[in-house]
Image: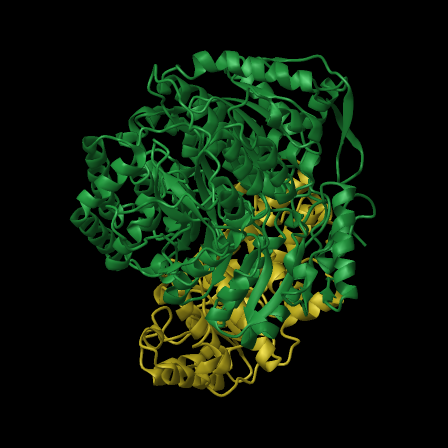
Chain colours: A yellow, B green
Amino acid sequence: MDDRSKTALAGHNIERNPGAPLDPSWFEGVGVNLSAVERRTATLTARRSVKKEYQAAWLVKALTCIDLTTLAGDDTPGRVRRLCAKARRPLSDELLDALDLADDPPTVGAVCVYPTMVPPAVKALEGSGIPVASVATGFPSGLTPLKQRLAEIAYAVGEGAGEIDIVITRAHVLNRDWAALYDEVKAMREACGPAHLKAILGTGDLKTLRNVYAASMVAMQAGADFIKTSTGKEDVNATMPVSLVMLRALRDYGALTGHEIGFKPAGGLRTAKDALNWLFLMKEELGDRWLQPDLFRIGASSLLNDIERQLDHYATGRYSASYRHAMA
Amino acid sequence: MGKIRDILRTMEYGPSPESNDHVVAWLQAHAQGFGHYIDGEFTKPGALFEVTNPATGKLLAKATQGSAADIDAAVSAARKAFASWSTTPGHIRARHLYALARHIQKRDRFLAVLESMDNGKPIRESRDLDVPLVARHFYHHAGWAELIETEFPGYGPVGVCGQIIPWNFPLLMLAWKIAPALAAGNTVVLKPAEFTPLTALAFAEICRDAGLPPGVVNIVTGDGAPGEALVSHPGIDKIAFTGSTEVGRLIRKATAGTGKKLSLELGGKSPFVVFEDADLDSAVEGVVDAIWFNQGQVCCAGSRLLVQEGVAERLYGKLRARMAHLRVGDPLDKSTDIGAIVAPIQLQRITKLVDEGARDGATVWQPKTALPSQGCFYPPTLITDVEPASTLAEVEIFGPVLVAMTFRTPDEAVALANNIRYGLAASVWSENINRSLEIAAQIKAGVIWINSTNLFDAAAGFGGYRESGFGREGGREGLSEYLAPKKSAGKAERQEKRPAPLSALPGQSAAVGDGAVGIDRTAKLYIGGKQARPDSGYSYSVVDPHGEAVGQAGLGNRKDIRNAVEAAGKAASWGAATGHNRAQVLFYFAENLNARAAEFAARLAGMTGVSAKEAKGEVDAAIRRTFFYAGFADKYDGAVHSTRSRHITLAMNEPWGIMGIACPDAAPLLAFISLVMPAIAMGNRVIVTPSPAHPLAATDLYQVLDTSDVPAGVVNIVTGERDALAKTLAEHEGVDALWYCGTPDGAKMVEAASISNLKATWTDAHARDWLSGESQGRAFLRRATQVKNIWAPYGE
């Protein structure tokens, strides 16, 4: 890793989004055409391809953007420690040698856990520079009282979480209550303090792409540092069309305010090919700046293993097996 | 520094070449040169021409320059094969087409790579668009071969078809031509473009390997010379051509009067209309697919961007940002968006047009995209500050060059969209379905894509209005181009007699009445709902079979035709009226004609010498035929084609607009009615030249028209010399279609004279039995309309 990307891995090196007053005119007149969006995403992934060492490098890049995640009811401190160990050292020494990255080994972008798992995660990642992200605010439904949701944020930040993945109240979007949505996210952003706020839109629940665009814009106006597709618990999670619309909203917000907002697809990204497709999407729609982990994260758990297997294939020329790579 | 580390910093895509080993080996195996494919075999290579790879300028292969003798041999083989292929059961033909589709799929990557090497198009496009559509076309038409006997009763193949295809979609255009021809039982001689013959030759091998009977498909390569020989060959029954409007005109002229069926798919300058309520980011992607697809070498390319003024700068900004991401380069690289221009001469043409436009004050913008150092490449280009009067707004550039203009209102968008000689396609972007459909209905083009562009499917019709040609490819409407009514056996064809010259000499006035001084009754012309004196100031005597004058008719001239077309132009609301309204008018017309049936019968008997019974029969048939088309006015429905999921593809039958109709001398009332009624039932306005020898049945209709609520200008009648008037109609650029019933010479003249605006013509030089059922029906309605396919994707 060069110095620049190392800084990026260590945290965030951009001016944070201060938000903007709620202004529905930024999204209410904006058309989003489903069929046209689907055509773009269907052809986009067929328009770009990376091979050989380029593919290997792109997969390493994807790895550095992963929010390595465990969000299960049976999570324990032990499970979280195992995850953190993998986050610190995602690739084997053999693989690092083959990729010539041994003297500056890549790590994942962050580790993402439930609030009560923040303390063991912070401990396990001490000194690594890898931030701990915590979901909060009544994840995944977000339907606990606001006071409790804000307290949850304060707890996670207090335990050392550097990033908070909040969930929005989908009802506010479905009922077009933009002021309620704005106030809620703004309050959450205040509760985050120095921690970065990733706003999970729950796009699978929002159903229409116009809802996705509007919710993205309100979250950014309320001060979100990142917008994120899904909790991973909806029926449909990160899809390319949803991601494209969020990126367009993010680009429009940037054009209106000058602020750079991050993007995080989560749920459903399992293969190395998925990761490449999302990197293509970022590069084509937003440019190289959004290929860095301070502006792009992939919420995933099993993806890392597939990336390792593909990198192994690049290094050895043989197709690899899962059991040869350390579990997360 | 390791390589991986460098790439992590630059995040470039790197090379991603599609392997071409198999294609190179195939080309090496044919290094001695390709012959033609005639009668199921490849001929020995003859005089060879070079086929180069436009991306490298390097030689790919040599193919044989076809001669007139080669065309002759190919047509003979096709004629011989026609006898058995046309009588092969549809089911067996379906098996053959299915086999071709399967073989194409089995060689899809080979064909895609070969196409990209020969044409320069990116492998993504040949792999994901061209070749899958080729296979789709053969599958679709395998189905038609099976269904044709039940779906098109009374119709059979046209015969031997000459097909000439362009270089922009070599294999796809081959499929669009060959699949329907074969499904309908025709045999073909196809000439691929000189720049790009290789996939056609690979297809010839597929025909051989798939066991297609010899002579059913013949392929002759070469430049324009064998194409000309094919067009003028007397053994050809139909010509299908895709290419430039200029060559289309030459073909129309060369085939005039030969009776060859003709379909032309020509150039375009298609509008891409973006309203302020459009999904602008998606519209930008639409533009990419419209004009930076296939290097912009697409006849239906959305090459004229019309954007609502208030969002123009925002859209241009988004476009420029998007253009910077387009990758121009090696067509075989999987990450290439824009490949090579097909040949140096095309590159020069594009460069020259853009440079001239810049000199004329247009603002030319190109991204700082790196171009390969060799080969034919041109960067994506956006040109603003273009006005409708600019050359760049009028001519087809046929390259990756978009010209942009703004509009203020929907009406102005339509006016600008239609302010062009072409009418192939259009794209309409708005999130308001009411607006989108209204604009789609108003744009004069054969294909309209709503919130989409360049969507194709074998089940949908494709083809143009105006100077973009006539005829359709794909779907039911495309198949009918390869079908003809089966001729009733043993019926000798008679020809219309050459008419005697009309005389305007004085002294022949009819002695009308019973010897007492009657009131003179001289028919004038009927223009714009009023009787108008002929511009010439002359009338001519109408005589009965004994040479006795029975009346006088105006001697119309070209100025009268001009006036009639003007009047028809003012009656445009007829086309927008409901079918029900038009039916009511036609019924009322029949009612009024019926009230005067005896008078018309007497007129016919006196003028033509037919018996009273025959005359009554003709009048009765005319009344009944009017009822027939009144009935059809609201029943000649379009279709919804089965194309893609969540897309409605509407095939709408639209009137041409203004039609010329030249009537025969036979059955002067019934022929007039048989031609005029289907035309106006479909919403056309007509300028009719009635029977020159027996015009009085038509002139007597003036009062029937007046009393039947036929709006002024819908039916205009100009009496006089048929061929002189028909020539003016054929040349008139405000006339959209022309039907001519007269002599073979006249038919030839009309077809040759129609080339200026490439109007659709229908000539009939054999004496029809106007009383028979063959002289009415859907065939007339089909000729009175053109099909517009509107694609409307849906979903939220």
Q: Where is residue B656 in the image (x, y as percent from the top left)?
A: 43, 50
The residue at 41%/52% (across/down) is: B790
Image quarter (top left, top right, bottom left or bottom right) of the N terminus of chain A: bottom right
In this rendering, the answer to whether A19 lies above or below B289 is: below
Q: In this view, does A129 lie to the left or right of B374?
A: left
In front here: A281 or B251? Answer: B251
Specify the quadrant of the image occupied by residue A284: bottom right
The residue at 75%/55% (across/down) is: B353
Q: Can residue B263 be seen in the rendering of this structure? A: yes
Residue with the most extreme right position: B373
Q: Position of residue A92 (x, y in %)?
A: 64, 49
In front here: A192 or B16? Answer: B16
In front here: B229 or B27? Answer: B229
Q: Where is residue B197 in the image (x, y as percent from the top left)?
A: 67, 29
Q: Is residue A132 left or right of residue B513?
A: right
Q: Position of residue A252 (x, y in %)?
A: 55, 74
Specify the quadrant of the image occupied by residue B406: bottom right
In front here: B522 or B460? Answer: B522
Q: Is residue B276 left or right of residue B541?
A: right
In this rendering, the answer to whether B274 lies above or below B334 is: below
The residue at 44%/19% (across/down) is: B96
Count the numbered circles shown: 0
In this rendering, the answer to whether B54 lies above or below B373 is: above
The residue at 44%/80% (across/down) is: A153
Q: Can residue B36 be seen in the rendering of this structure? A: no
